[in-house]
């Protein structure tokens, strides 16, 4: 409700940031999320983090060793992350679901766009064929999938909506493609930075998988303009980790690691 009164200043500042601090040889293609993050800092506004608890409703996700549902672990932990983020006063949080509801994948990404999310964290728990394997891990979108999906998205959507401060309709199509590509690459780089922060901060709290940062073509990671990662909190297929993941104290430890990585990420963006 307060956005209206801020919108002129915010837009002017976005344009300023895009045109000066971040402009590279006149090509001022910065992703909206990145520009928003810098703007929020300049205006002392809380950053908007979108949390996405996986699955829900008819879709239970993975089913654990004890029979526990992934959807319930994901929601409980996401709520704790939200609580800690908001308690810091540095962040506002929007959740793609706040109860046991089924939300289609594309709606989750659309929700993050509509909310103006600066960061998107999808929260899951894994189940692997080998019940001996345990540990948390982090996924980012693979570069290959990203290229294809982003290209398709670019055709479907109004590209001007995807890039801050740039009216693509005024440019030749080839220039639009280049600007879009620059913004998408920047988002990918920031997502990889975020994933590294997640791995190192989660690793201080809980056990990690050996291969703790992987990439895949997850639908919820396909926003070309919002840095994002998908966290697998642990392996529900492992008896010990199944039990741990249900404990509020363990969920608090996971949340602490996640919140520190969000802090690291925005500290990095602020210095960029
Ligand atoms: Zn899942």
Image: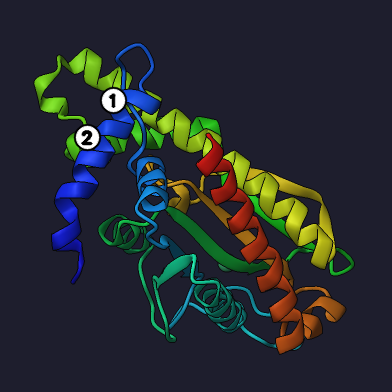
In front here: 82 or 172?
A: 82
Q: Residues within 10 Å of mark 2 (few under 14, many from 20)?
A: many
Residue 3 seen from this side: yes
**Ligand 1 lies under 8 Å from the Cβ of mark 1:** no
The reply, left or right, for residue 99 in relation to residue 213 is left
At horizontal 63% and vertical 51% (from top left) the residue drawn is 264
Closer to the camera, 51 or 125? 51
Q: Is residue 121 left or right of residue 2?
A: right
Foreground residue among 99 and 56 = 99
Q: Tell me the mark number nearer the camera, choosing from 1 and 2.
A: 1
Q: Residue at left 62%, top 74%?
A: 62
Q: How is the image coloured?
A: rainbow
The image position of residue 235, as x and y in percent, is 75, 69
Where is residue 85 shown, x and y percent of the image? 54, 71
Quadrant into which the N terminus falls: bottom left
Q: Are marks 1 and 2 in contact (CB under 8 Å)?
A: yes
The residue drawn where x is 66% and y is 61% is 260
**Placement of 132 over or under 8, stated as above or below:** below
Label 2: which secondary element:
loop
Residue placed under numbered mark 2 in the picture: 165
Write down the quadrant of residue 163 in the picture: top left
Where does label 1 land, which residue?
19
The answer to which quarter of the image holds residue 154 is: top left
Q: Residue at x 62, y 65 (%)?
A: 259
* Residue nearer the viewer, 28 or 199: 28
Q: Position of residue 150 (x, y in %)?
A: 36, 35
Q: What is the spatial separation of the Cα atoms under label 1 and label 2, in whole angstroms?
A: 9 Å
Could you tell me how many numbered marks the image carries? Answer: 2
Other-residue count near label 1 (Cα within 10 Å), few / some / many at <14 / 14–19 / ≥20: some
């Amino acid at each position: 409700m307060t956005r209206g009164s801020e919108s002129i200043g915010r837009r002017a500042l976005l344009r300023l940031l895009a045109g000066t601090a971040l402009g590279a040889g006149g090509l001022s293609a910065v992703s909206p999320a990145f520009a928003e993050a810098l703007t929020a800092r300049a205006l002392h506004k809380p950053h908007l983090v979108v949390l996405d608890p996986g699955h829900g409703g008819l879709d239970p996700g993975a089913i654990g060793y004890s029979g526990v549902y992934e959807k319930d672990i994901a929601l409980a932990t996401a709520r704790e992350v939200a609580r800690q983020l908001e308690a810091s006063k540095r962040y506002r949080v929007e959740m793609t679901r706040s109860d046991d509801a089924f939300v289609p994948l594309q709606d989750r990404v659309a929700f993050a766009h509509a909310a103006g999310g600066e960061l998107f964290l999808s929260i899951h728990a894994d189940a692997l064929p080998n019940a001996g394997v345990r540990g948390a891990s982090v996924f980012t979108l693979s570069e290959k999938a990203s290229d294809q999906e982003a290209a398709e998205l670019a055709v479907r959507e109004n590209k001007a909506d995807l890039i801050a401060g740039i009216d693509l309709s005024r440019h030749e199509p080839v220039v639009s493609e280049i600007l879009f590509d620059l913004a998408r690459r920047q988002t990918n780089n920031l997502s990889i930075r975020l994933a590294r922060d997640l791995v190192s901060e989660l690793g201080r709290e809980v056990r990690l998988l050996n291969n703790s940062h992987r990439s895949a073509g997850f639908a919820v990671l396909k926003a070309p303009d919002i840095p994002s990662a998908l966290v697998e909190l642990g392996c529900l297929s492992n008896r010990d980790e199944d039990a741990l993941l249900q404990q509020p104290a363990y969920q608090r430890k996971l949340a602490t690691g996640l919140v520190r990585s969000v802090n690291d990420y925005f500290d990095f963006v602020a210095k960029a």
